[in-house]
Amino acid sequence: MLRSRRSRQPSPLARSTAGAGSGDFHQYRTARRNEQFRLERMDREAEEEEKQRVYEEKQRQRGEKCEERSAKKRQKRLKKKANRRAAKGGAAGPAPPAADDSDSDDALAGKADLD
């Protein structure tokens, strides 16, 4: 007798649950749980990055606002100082420094030489 020559098709790796073996559901459940954890972690990381971005933006705005206030007060102090010098000596004296940071090391070194 001759056997029929049917080609054997490989069985699919993920079978339907009706014909699934005893371990297939556990493998499916594990894979699903791992995927859910991965998606939750991605969502958490995205939220944390957004919170960090918002925080850094607020910090930058606060710093700019503080710098504006400091510059305004600095100008007011320098103007007041120039007015005192003008009233005391009659001469305007040297012009006040520009609006940059006058507390640099060079300015402090010049003040130390006067003492």
Image (cartoon, rainbow, N blue to C red):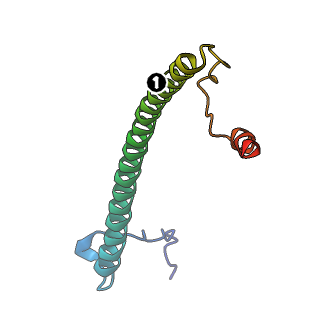
Say which of 88 and 28 sits in front. Answer: 88
Q: Residue 79, how many percent across, how many down?
A: 51, 20
Q: Residue 85, how many percent across, how many down?
A: 57, 22
- In percent of the image, x 47 and y 34: which residue is there? 67
Q: Which residue is mark 1?
A: 76
- In percent of the image, x 58 and y 24: which residue is there? 99
- In the image, farthest residue toward the top: 91
In the picture shown, does residue 13 fall above or below 100? below
**Res 43 → quadrant:** bottom left
In the picture shown, does residue 10 fall above or below 49? below
Q: Within 10 angstroms of label 1, few (less than 14), some, or many (20 or more) residues?
A: few
- In the image, farthest residue toward the left: 18
Q: Residue 113, how many percent across, how many down?
A: 77, 44
In the picture shown, does residue 28 fall above or below 68? below
Q: Residue 36, how many percent across, how many down?
A: 32, 65
Say which of 35 and 3 sits in front. Answer: 35
Say which of 78 and 82 sits in front. Answer: 82
Q: Amino acid at mark 1?
A: Lys
- In the image, farthest residue toward the front: 89
